[in-house]
């Protein structure tokens, strides 16, 4: 007999769509004992949330998230709001014994993140943060290779996340679609938005970081604020570069910017171990580039593994099409819901949960601290 998992979605932007699509797809490709029901979509403006709810098949709407988190017919609250609302909603949802799926980054900073971790752990509710790139099959395969010890000792981890959508100086800050430029809503710029993904993947693959030294830049210093109608100082970081050290002794080299003309979402990482190196590129997301030093000398070189075999060798792919046929970005969210449900079925901790995502939050705090003060900063450990 299937149990229902009634979802209450807060927000209706890009991530509201990505998550709703995953809820609709998951039962078709990852059958389980749970049936996901899109119960209610919530946003302040009924005229905006109603068409969203109709398009994705939500049964009802709410215009006050407080009412949503109190509803008896909701099991899971999905937080897709700007970052400055994550904590308040999550704490209230936990107090109402709701499970919580929260968009990344977990919080505005580590202090808020800690409150969120405490709230869900005290309430004993399942919780997870949408660091979806872990669930791209090629990235999950990288994790398996590392866990199997194939790389040997790891020396280097380097990652980049490059975009170019905020170069225009007359782009306003604040409001729908542009809250990521408003420090009061986002907490930070590219560090919390893009580097957060790189850091989450890195910690997952290579463990925690111990110390970092960073530099940030805000190229456009003032922008019209959509909410106040005035030209105001920009408080977010437009670009961030940092170096650091992992607890396992390997070196970190990270860069993120929204000013890399020509790049829309170039997320890449490379890991160099004593026996093997791995490289992944979001624009070629189903491929994992592998160099194995132990290969026979005359054929040694980089190979491009097309991670689309539907055998257990290639994570998630047995649930999709026939070998050789790729899946896309959207599937990473579907995999995340599938993994969440599997964790519920097994009574395990769905990862990354709030406690896990707090590790990334503490690296983000260290990045901003280091950029402000020009020092090396020790990363607080969860
Ligand atoms: C920003 O443009 C953004 O949409 C991020 O907010 C997402 O987390 C990232 O996956 C793609 O880029």
Image (tube, rainbow, N blue to C red):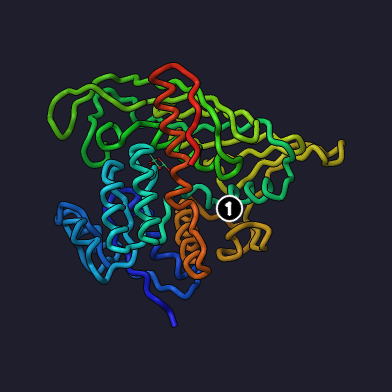
Image-quarter location of ligand 1: top left
- Tell me if the residue at label 1 has its CB under 8 Å from ligand 1: no
Q: Position of residue 76 (x, y in %)?
A: 34, 63
Q: Position of residue 376 (x, y in %)?
A: 50, 21
Query: Is residue 372 shown left or right of residue 46?
Result: right
Q: Point out the residue furthest to the top here.
A: 374
Taking the spot 33% from the left edge, 57% from the top edge, the residue there is 78
Query: Is residue 241 shown left or right of residue 188?
Result: right
Q: Position of residue 112 (x, y in %)?
A: 33, 41
Q: Considering the image in quadrants, where does the N terminus appear?
A: bottom left
Q: Nearer the viewer, residue 149 or 136?
A: 149
Disc 1: CA contacts within 10 A as few (<14), some (14-19) or many (>=20): many
Q: Point out the residue furthest to the front here.
A: 122
Q: Quadrant of residue 25?
A: bottom left
Taking the spot 29% from the left edge, 52% from the top edge, the residue there is 91
Q: Quadrant of residue 257?
A: top left
Name the residue that disc number 1 marks: 137
The mark tally for this picture is 1
Q: Position of residue 318 (x, y in %)?
A: 61, 64
**Label 1's element?**
helix
Taking the spot 37% from the left edge, 70% from the top edge, the residue there is 5
Up the image or down, 242 lies above or below 40; here it is above
Q: Point out the residue furthest to the left here.
A: 229
Up the image or down, 102 lies above or below 208; here it is below
Q: Nearer the viewer, residue 115 or 297?
A: 115
Query: Is residue 378 shown left or right of residue 229?
Result: right
Q: Nearer the viewer, residue 284 or 196?
A: 196
């Amino acid at each position: 007999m299937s149990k229902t998992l009634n979802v209450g979605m807060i927000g209706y932007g890009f991530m509201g769509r990505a998550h709703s699509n995953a809820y609709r797809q998951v039962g078709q490709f990852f059958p389980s004992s749970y049936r996901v029901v899109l119960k209610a979509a919530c946003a302040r403006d009924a005229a905006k949330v109603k068409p969203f709810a109709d398009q994705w098949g939500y049964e009802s709407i709410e215009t006050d998230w407080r009412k949503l988190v109190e509803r008896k017919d909701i099991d899971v609250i999905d937080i897709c709001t700007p970052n400055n609302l994550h904590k308040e909603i999550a704490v209230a949802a936990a107090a109402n014994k709701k499970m919580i799926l929260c968009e990344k980054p977990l919080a505005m900073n580590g202090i808020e993140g800690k409150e969120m971790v405490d709230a869900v752990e005290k309430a004993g509710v399942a919780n997870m943060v949408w660091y979806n790139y872990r669930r791209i099959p090629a990235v999950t395969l990288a994790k398996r290779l590392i866990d199997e010890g194939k790389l040997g000792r790891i020396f280097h981890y380097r990652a980049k996340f490059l975009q170019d959508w905020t170069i225009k100086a007359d782009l306003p800050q604040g409001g729908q679609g542009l809250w990521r430029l408003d420090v009061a809503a986002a907490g930070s710029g590219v560090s919390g938005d893009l580097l957060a993904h790189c850091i989450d993947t890195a910690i997952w693959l290579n463990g925690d970081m111990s110390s970092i030294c960073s530099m940030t830049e805000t190229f456009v210093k003032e922008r019209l604020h959509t909410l106040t109608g005035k030209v105001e100082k920009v408080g977010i970081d437009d670009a961030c570069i940092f170096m650091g050290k992992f607890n396992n002794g390997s070196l970190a080299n990270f860069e993120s910017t929204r000013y890399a003309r020509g790049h829309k979402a170039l997320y890449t990482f490379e890991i160099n171990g004593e026996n093997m190196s791995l490289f992944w590129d979001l624009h070629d997301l189903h491929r994992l580039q592998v160099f194995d030093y132990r290969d026979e000398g005359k054929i040694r070189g980089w190979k491009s593994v097309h991670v689309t075999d539907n055998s257990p060798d290639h994570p998630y792919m047995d649930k999709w099409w026939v070998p050789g046929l790729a899946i896309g970005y959207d599937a990473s969210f579907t995999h995340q819901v599938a993994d969440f449900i599997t964790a519920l079925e097994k009574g395990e901790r769905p990862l990354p949960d709030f406690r896990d995502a707090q590790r990334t939050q503490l690296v983000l705090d260290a990045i901003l601290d280091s950029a402000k003060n020009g020092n090396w900063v020790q990363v607080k450990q969860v």
